[in-house]
């Protein structure tokens, strides 16, 4: 299901072509995508990125599409990986009260969030490392990311592989906007939850190690 088909399906299911409603469909879709991505972490939301930290700088910028960390590693000159432990900023500050304390980083914390100005994102936030790097290092971040919306790309993984989930999530948002029939809203909410559980079950199955856990039953 591409974006044009999704837009048409929303209008067909709601039987609503009113101008304000139609102009609000992109909002419904973005809200629906956000609802789904915050509810299930499918493998297609994972990404790997490499970057670098520099000596005497305890901060590492986050990727623009960052949602949550899976792992963060520092790679030394020999190619050996050292996986950092996630902590709170207060822990890093207390463990290394002076930024001049340097070494191979052992810990990281999310230091700050995205910064917006004039309606646009100007900064994607930073990690803080402890201790401060004593040299320039390569870093590898494995993280959950926010995919581009089907609105912007015409097609998406959800539209191609979980179209019922995406459609019912959109219908929940649309009927909430319309203050539509309560029974029908409840029905769409139930169908959304069923489709979400099916996707979550598929995600769990994909993460299984069949050799260790046995084949699915």
Image: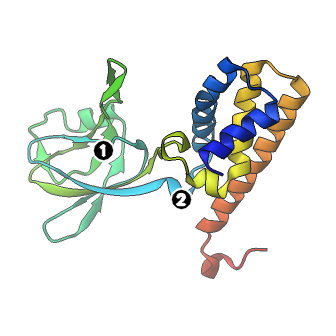
- From the top left corner, tell me how far across and down residue 175 is, in percent: 77, 26
Tags 1 and 2 touching, CB below 8 Å? no
Q: Residue at x 32, y 44 (%)?
A: 63
Q: Neighbour class for label 2 at 10 Å: few (<14), some, many (≥20)?
A: few
Q: Residue at x 76, y 20 (%)?
A: 178
Q: Nearer the viewer, residue 127 or 104?
A: 127
Q: Left or right of 59: which side holds 175?
A: right
Q: Label 1: which residue?
A: 108
Q: Left or right of 99: which side holds 211?
A: right
Q: Quadrant of residue 160?
A: bottom right
Q: Residue at x 48, y 41 (%)?
A: 152
Q: Which mark is residue 183?
A: none
Label 1 to label 2: alpha-carbon separation? 24 Å
- From the top left corner, tell me how far across and down residue 214 is, in percent: 69, 79
Visible residue check, residue 169: no
Q: Label 2: which residue?
A: 43
Q: Nearer the viewer, mark 1 or mark 2?
A: 2
Q: Left or right of 47: which side holds 18?
A: right
The earlier-in-sequence mark between 1 and 2 is: 2
Q: Quadrant of residue 91?
A: top left
What is the secondary structure assignment of the residue under circle 2? helix
Q: Residue at x 47, y 44 (%)?
A: 148
**Of all residues shown, which one is farthest toward the bottom?**
211
- From the top left corner, tell me how far across and down residue 216 is, in percent: 74, 74
């Amino acid at each position: 299901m591409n974006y044009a088909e999704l837009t048409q399906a929303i209008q067909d299911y709601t039987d609503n072509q009113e101008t304000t409603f139609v102009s609000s469909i992109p909002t419904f879709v973005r809200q629906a995508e956000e609802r789904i991505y915050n509810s299930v972490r499918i493998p297609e939301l994972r990404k790997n990125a490499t970057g670098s930290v520099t000596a005497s700088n305890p901060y590492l910028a986050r990727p623009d599409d960052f949602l949550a960390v899976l792992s963060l590693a520092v790679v030394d000159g020999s190619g050996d990986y050292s996986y950092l432990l996630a902590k709170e900023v207060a822990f890093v500050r207390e463990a290394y009260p002076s930024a001049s304390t340097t070494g191979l980083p052992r810990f990281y914390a999310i230091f700050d969030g995205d910064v917006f100005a004039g309606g646009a994102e100007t900064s994607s936030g930073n990690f803080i490392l402890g201790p401060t790097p004593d040299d320039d290092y390569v870093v590898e971040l494995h993280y959950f990311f926010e995919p581009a919306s089907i609105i912007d790309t015409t097609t998406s993984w959800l539209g191609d592989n979980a179209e019922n989930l995406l459609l019912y999530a959109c219908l929940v948002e649309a009927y909430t906007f319309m203050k539509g029939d309560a029974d029908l809203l409840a029905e769409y909410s139930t169908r959304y939850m069923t489709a979400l559980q099916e996707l979550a079950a598929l995600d769990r199955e994909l993460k299984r190690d069949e050799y260790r856990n046995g084949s699915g039953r």
